Image (cartoon, grey):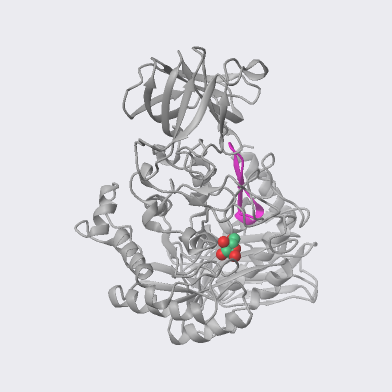
Amino acid sequence: MSIKKNVRQSLAIIGALCALPGVALPADAATLTVSVGQPGVPINRGMWGIFFEDINFGADGGLYAELVKNRSFEFPDALMGWREQGTGAGATAISAQSRLTIQTNAPFNSVNPHYLRIQAASPAACGAVNEGFRGMGVKAGEQYDFSVQVRKMTGSPQLLVELVGADGKVLAQEKINKLPADWQLKKVTLHPKTTVAQARLNILVVGGGTVDLDLVSLFPRHTWKQRPGGLRADMVQLLADLKPGFLRFPGGCVVEGHTLANRYQWKTTIGPIAERKLILNRWNDEFKHRPTPDYYQTFGLGFFEYFQLCEDIGAAPLPVLNCGMACQFNSGELVPLDQLDPYIQDALDLVEFANGPVTSVWGARRAAMGHPQPFGLNMLGIGNEQWGPAYLERYDRFHAALKAKYPALLLIASAGPSPSDQNFQLAWAKLRVLPADLVDEHCYANPPWFFTNAHRYDNYDRRGPKVFFGEYAAQSDRTVSVKNRNNLECALAEAACMTGLERNGDVVQMASYAPLFAHVDGWQWCPDLIWMDNLRSYGTPNYYVQKLFANNAGDMALPLQLTAPDGIKLFASATRDNATGEMILKVVNGGNAPAGVNLDFSGAKKIAPRATVFTLAGRSGRDENSLTNPQKISPETARLKIPAPQFPYTFPANSLTVLRLKITK
Ligand code: AHR
C-alpha cells in the first residue's frame, strides 16, 4: 500500500472515530485530564528495551545468519545435520559411493578437534549433504558465501558445492579445483536464481579420493551492515525499528544452564570463530513436548557481536552473568561460596572487556577483535531468575567486588520467577538493604493480570532500588502452554500494564518483553515478540505495542486523572518529550466497544492546532499477524485537528492510541 493511500485511509478512520468538536459525549462518558502544566516526574528515556535469549532458534538458526548446522562437527552426534549423498540425484542416487566418517587425529584446530572425512569410491560426484536449520532459506539474486577448511588425503579430487532445492533441483553450484594437501581455507560464492525456503547444501567430491573438511560455512552476503559472518538483516532491522533503550543478553535460563557445566560463559564466546566451543542449548531438551535435539549454542553470536549489535541499534548493553547457580528449575547446582571467585572475576573481566583501555588484558582482546573504543557498559545483571537465601548471599559477594572496582556500575538483582510470592518478598526485603540498584521482576500471566496490574506500581516504595520489569508477556492460555497466541488481546493487556510502568517511571526504570524471537519450525516457548521462518520475519501485535511505546517515550511522566464508568476498560499514561516540546498521550481501550472520552489539556498555555495520532486496533482481541499477513495488526498514522484544549475523542474498540501534541506549559 502506498504511503499516500495509507495516510488517506487513516485520515478517514480518524474522521469516523473522533467525535465531532462541539458534539458532546454522554454525561457519564469517561474523562481524561492531563496536567500538562505541571512538571511531572523525570523518567528514563531509554526505559523500553529488549531482551534477547537464544531460545526458539533465536541465535543459531535465527539471528546468526549461518546456514550450515553443525558446521564444525562438534555436536555430540558429530554427523547430526549431515548425511551421505551418493552419485546421481534424488531417487536415482546411488548411495554407498562415499563414506562419511568423523576424525580427530590431525585437526586444523585442536579446540574443536572433530572433522569430516569423505572417502569417495566413485569418480562421479558424491559426498555429504547439510540440511541446515529446518532447511536453508536462499533468495534469488542474492549471493551466498561458502567457505571450508579443507585438505586432500588421497587422489586428485575436486569439490563441487551445490545449493539444492527440496525437489532435488540444483539452484547454484561452484567448483573448488585445487585441493591443498594441508588444511587451508577455501571459498566460493553461490548465486541461486530461485528463492527457496528449504534448500540444502551438497559438498561433493568429484574424481574420487579422500578429503577432510571442517568449519563448513554458508552465509548470505547480505547481512546486517553487510558484515561477513554477520546477523540476519531483516531480523536486526525489526530490532532497530523498535529504537530500544537497552538490550539484555544472553538470557534467560541459558545464563544458568541445567547444570553449571553448561552455563553461559562469556569468555568462550569471543575471539576467532574456530576457537569458540559450543555447548548444549538448554532449550534443546527442556520441554518434553517440544524437543529440539539439534539445538546447540555455537556462539557465532558471542559477546563481541552482542556489544556491536547494541552499538548498531543505539541500545545500552545490559549483560546478565551466571552468579554461581545453575537453573533452579533444573539441578539448582550451587558453587560453594569459597569457590565463587572465578565467577566474580568473570564479571570484573567482562566490564574490562567492554570498557577497559586497550592496554588492559581484556580491553586488548576487544581491540584485537576490531573495536578499540569502549562499548560504554554501565549496567550488569547478577544471575537471571534466581531466588532464595543462596542467591542473596551470592549476589552480596558480586556486589561487594564489583562496586569496589566500578562504583558507578549499576547492578541488577533478581526477584525470582514470580512477581509476588514469598521468594519475591524475601528478595525485595534483602535487596533494599544490600542494596541492589535495580530489582528484576518477571511475570508471565494471563491478560487479566496485566490489566489489573496497570496500577501495581502506583503505591510502590520510592526509596531504595528501582524496578526493572525484565521479562513479561501475557499468556492467552497459560505459561509454557503451546496454545499461547500472540494476539491483540494479549498485546493490549501488556500495553495497559505498560501505561502503569510509564506513569510510575520514577520507580520503574526499565522494561522488556520476553522472549524476543521464535522460528515457526524451531520454537520451544510461545508467545514471542517476533516470528520468522528461513526467509521472512514479522512483528506480532505485541511487537507493535513495544514499538509504539519505545518510539514515543518521554523524559517525564505527566500527572493525569482518568475516570471511566464501570465496565469501560481504559488505561492511560502521558509523558513529555523535552526535545520536541510534545506531550505524548497513550490510551488503551481494552474493551470490545469504542470508548468516548472527554480529553482535557486545559492546563497548557498554548497547544498546537494539530496532533499526530498512531492507532493500533483490530476487530477482535483474537486478531494476530502472520508470515502471510504480517501487518494485519499494525499502527495507522494520521494527523488530527485539535479543536480546543478540551475535546471529545472516541478510542476504537481493542486499541492502543498514541497522540503526540505540541504544548507550551
Ligand atoms: O523467557 C523465557 C524464560 O522465562 C527465560 O529464559 C527465563 O528467565 C524465564 O523463566
Ligand 1 shows up in the quarter that is bottom right
Q: In which quarter of the image is residue 342?
A: bottom left
Residue at 74%, 75% in the rendered image = 564
Residue displayed at 57% across by 16% down: 87
Decide if residue 44 is in sight here: yes
Question: Does residue 146 appear left or right of residue 16 in this picture?
Answer: left
- Is residue 611 visible in the rendered structure shown here? no
Q: Per the image, is 536 magenta?
A: yes
**Residue 613 pos. (x, y %):** 61, 57
Q: Does the segment drawn in magenta span residue 146?
A: no
Left/right placement of residue 576 relative to residue 312 reads: right
Q: Could you say which quadrant of the image residue 610 lies in?
A: bottom right
Of 75 and 286, nearer the camera is 75
Q: Which residue is drawn at 77% across and 62% down?
A: 594
Up the image or down, 170 lies above or below 396; here it is above
Q: Relative to 460, say whether 377 is above or below.
A: above
Front residue of 187/591: it is 187
Part of the protein shown in magenta: 528-543
